[in-house]
Image (cartoon, helix red, strand yellow):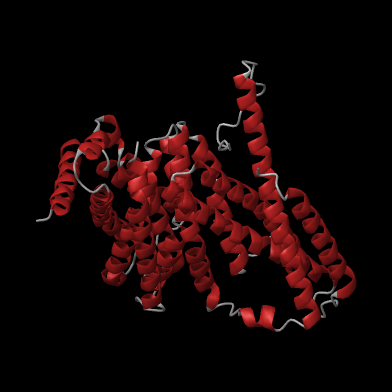
Amino acid sequence: MTPSRTAFAAILAKDLRSELRTLQSLPAMALFAVTTFVVFRFGLDRTSLSGSLASGVLWATLLFAAVLGINRLFVSEREEGGFDAIRLAPIDRTVLFAAKAAALVIYLAALELVTVPIFAIFFLEDAAGLGPLVAVLLLADLGLAATGTLISSMAVNSRARDLLVPLVLLPLSIPLMIAATGATEPLLSLGGPSYDRFGTWLMVLGLYDLIFGLVGYAVFDFLLED
Amino acid sequence: MYGKGLKPLSIAAVAMLALSLSLVFFYAPLDGDQGFIQKIFYVHVPLAITALVGFVAGGVFAILHLRSNDRKWDAYSYVAIHISVIFGVAVLITGAIWAKASWGHWWVWDEPTLVSFLIVFLLYATYYPFRYAIEDRDRQARYASVFAVTAGAFVPLNFMAVRMAESLVHPRTFATAEGGMPGEMMLTFLCSLVAMGLLWTTLVKFELTAKSASGQVKRLRRALDAPVAGGSSRIAPEVS
């Protein structure tokens, strides 16, 4: 293995192990998502959802739950001196970006593994659309991980950490949400899933992932200088 | 040194604005469909184009700042985004007026360009709290540049996504909006665009000159051990 890959694996393993031991982000995210579903049930006064309402409720909830995890992504790095250790280590700094983004993708996938079935049980009459939804979820997770890691690493070094992430990340994720809800809406429509413009939306999601992955990779170096 | 050329630039901007406004009111034909209200087009669209170009210019200055580590470029990036945000407020207001007059509503969600602009504006509006939250000056400049680069890449992607979300319901091509314009309208439009671009450049230069002058005054006062009057902005970069 190259040094970068070793460092990547080490940071990612460290993150996952610390999350498994402390469980400080994931249970909170899942609990928040499920509670939000209940809020939507009464806010919309609907017991079953389909089409655009279903995809809107699902993605708004996932986005806000993701913000909770993104907020905490770099907290241990800052409080326990992880940033200094990375700066001292003879490795490429962008490895930290890649490892943190990978950890975030895993968190988001775990979150969705729990909350999407609950969403289906709560609101959907027909779960046939959930299969192809996996592709949408994965591509959206990659994009959220790229922008989320970038914003989180900046916010954690500011005075208003908890404020900055939602403030900056929400407008930044709107194109992602447009594409994700666009792809999800026909999948969850009444009378079985349809694939209206499914491929086009997946391509927009992929483009978003690519652009912000590259931007994050290019600028992350400047965030660790001191 | 920033003041150099400010006077001729201001005069050119004012003259061009006067010329374009007189073209708008006395030369351009009345729109057959919308009548007099269509004339807001010559203010609204050039403002929007200038603001978007200004946002992207802020991103380019930010790249220069990151590459050269010269604080001057951070000031350029900040001022470019600052003036563009002010232009953005004007774009949203004129857009709402136009929408009310021609469609009967203050806000229309199925007009993709307007919606994209709102999203871009909302993102850039967070530039101020973002800068404000970072105390260390060097770090503030670096992070602000990273923000400007990211947001600059966001602008075209966002326009594409919003347009696609609407494209099937409301087919709207650029050809009917621009290509179908008669020559007099096109000329007036181009004049207004140049005038807005000059106005933007003048305002940016003016702001940089003012910042540089107040920075010099502060340094002179410090050298004389005189009390430095007035608190400085916590988010605006200092210009030498």
In this picture, is A112 found above or below B226? below
Q: Is residue B236 visible?
A: yes
Q: Residue at x 15, y 42 (%)?
A: A17
Q: Nearer the viewer, residue B118 or B196?
A: B196
Relative to A214, is B216 above or below? above
Front residue of this view, candidates A145 and B135: B135
Q: Is residue A35 visible?
A: no
Q: Where does the image place residue A224, in percent across and percent down from the top left?
A: 33, 41
Please provide percent x and percent y for residue B72.
54, 43
Which residue appears at 69% of the width and 55% of the height?
B200
Q: Quadrant of residue A52 in the image?
A: bottom left
Residue B199 location, quadrant: bottom right
Q: Residue furthest right?
A: B26
The N terminus of chain B: image quadrant:
top right
Q: Is residue B50 left or right of residue A159?
A: right
| Residue B12, percent from left and from top | 79, 58
The residue closer to the viewer here, B7 or A49, is B7
Which residue shows up at 60% across the image and 60% down it? B52
Please state the total of marks drawn on the protein image. Answer: 0
Quarter of the image with the C terminus of chain B is: top right
Q: Is residue B28 above or below residue A175?
A: below
Query: Residue furthest toward the left?
Result: A1
Q: Quadrant of residue B38?
A: bottom right
- Give residue B150's position: percent from left, percent from top: 45, 54
Q: Is residue B5 left or right of residue A141?
A: right
Name the residue located 31 percent from the left edge and 64 percent from the top edge. Answer: A139
